[in-house]
Image (cartoon, rainbow, N blue to C red):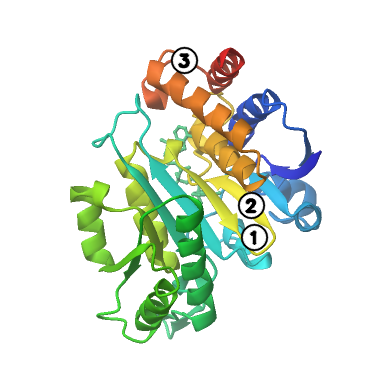
Amino acid sequence: MYRITLLPGDGIGPDITKATKTVLAATGVPIEWEEHIAGEVAIPEYGTPLPEPVLESIRRNKIALKGPLTTPVGGGFRSINVALRKEFDLYANVRPARTYKGIVSRYDNIDLVMIRENTEDLYAGVEHMVGEDAAESIKIITRKGSERICRFAFEYAVKNNRRKVTAVHKANIMKCTDGLFLSVAREVARDYPQIEFEDKIVDNMCMQLVQKPELYDVMVAPNLYGDIVSDLCAGLVGGLGVVPGANIGDNLAIFEPVHGSAPKYAGQDIANPTALLLSAVMMLRYLGETEAADKVENALAAVIREGKTVTPDLGGRAKGSEMASAIVDKMLKM
Ligand code: NAI
């Protein structure tokens, strides 16, 4: 029996979580969910968006599936997502983006994975005002942080039969910080002669991805570029509703969709559960439940391909819960 912390989160989170639980229950993988509230919904009860029982539960179970959490822009509390990644030192953010037949996008053969460093860079949040009219933010890149993320990217490439790793940087301008990241990436690459290695300056990378995405495979980047370029990749395959993510540390992992809480769709059961479901598929693979993971992914792909029981963002009229039932039906027939 796997005991897994479940955080449905804010906005559309509870709807897509329910749909995902329905599908996972049908895999037969024995999971005991330990459900907790976090995010805006936790504030009235606990006075904080990240209550201690959530942290305790994740610490104990070492694995969590998480819906989106609302973060106010500008002022207000700091991002809980960033806080969780820091608390558990989840240094690798894995963001695959692949095309599924039936989802309208500009390309039909994309299979990219961004491995984003998750704990340092400008995301460390070391910033302050300098008087009233200037502000300063400090970009932190370390050898240790760069080494472990680059090694993670190459190990990922080896384990998943990938052919190439591209390091994304701006070392031509940020010679110290990105320069360090790039030189560590080159060093690590020498330990993996079977994997092709190249590097790209981030602006060129964006253009190349839009023009020739099929040339790329696994990418590895410092935090901020990884964040931005992975959303670009999401755009290449049909948008935020369909891309999953995982935050992985040395012995703890949190799986979550890339999208946010889309408050305007909250409580209407019309949000697309695909991104959370694919995050759960990544979780099953992490647990070694490959057969169940394949089954869910294939059933989901078939439902999307047929296009009859899909949510409005995919051009259908189904509720999220109806899409989940259609996926379960497909699984039963496989
Ligand atoms: P968002 O991802 O919540 O929504 C942007 C648009 O994408 C939505 O208006 C909707 O049209 C579409 N969308 C997203 N997910 C969808 C789904 N599952 N099904 C159908 N359509 C979907 O981004 P936004 O509006 O910038 O952020 C809303 C809140 O979410 C903010 O408080 C933000 O901080 C938070 N957020 C949380 C994240 C997390 O918990 N990992 C990640 C990104 C944003």
Q: Which residue is mark 3?
A: 309
Q: CA distance from mark 3 to mark 1?
A: 35 Å
Above or below 306: residue 174: below
**Mark 2 surroundings: few (<14), some (14-19) or many (≥20) residues within 10 A:** many
Q: Which residue is mark 2?
A: 254
Going 50% across and 76% down the picture, which residue do you hit?
147
Residue 71 in the image: state x and y as whole percent.
55, 53
Displayed quadrant of residue 99: top left
- SS for dot 1: helix
- SS for dot 2: strand
State which mark lies toward you, 2 or 1: 2
Amino acid residing under circle 1: Leu
Quadrant the N terminus occupies? top right
- Mark before the other along the chain sequence, 2 or 3: 2
Amino acid residing under circle 2: Ile
Above or below 129: residue 258: above
Q: In front: 62, or 73?
A: 62
Going 63% across and 45% down the picture, which residue do you hit?
66
Residue 307 in the image: state x and y as whole percent.
39, 17
Marks 2 & 3, CB-CB < 8 Å contact: no
Going 25% across and 80% down the picture, which residue do you hit?
172
**Mark 3 surroundings: few (<14), some (14-19) or many (≥20) residues within 10 A:** many
Going 63% across and 52% down the picture, which residue do you hit?
254
Q: Is mark 2 within 8 Å of ligand 1?
A: no
Q: Which residue is mark 1?
A: 84
Residue 135 in the image: state x and y as whole percent.
40, 79
Specify whether residue 11 is in view. no
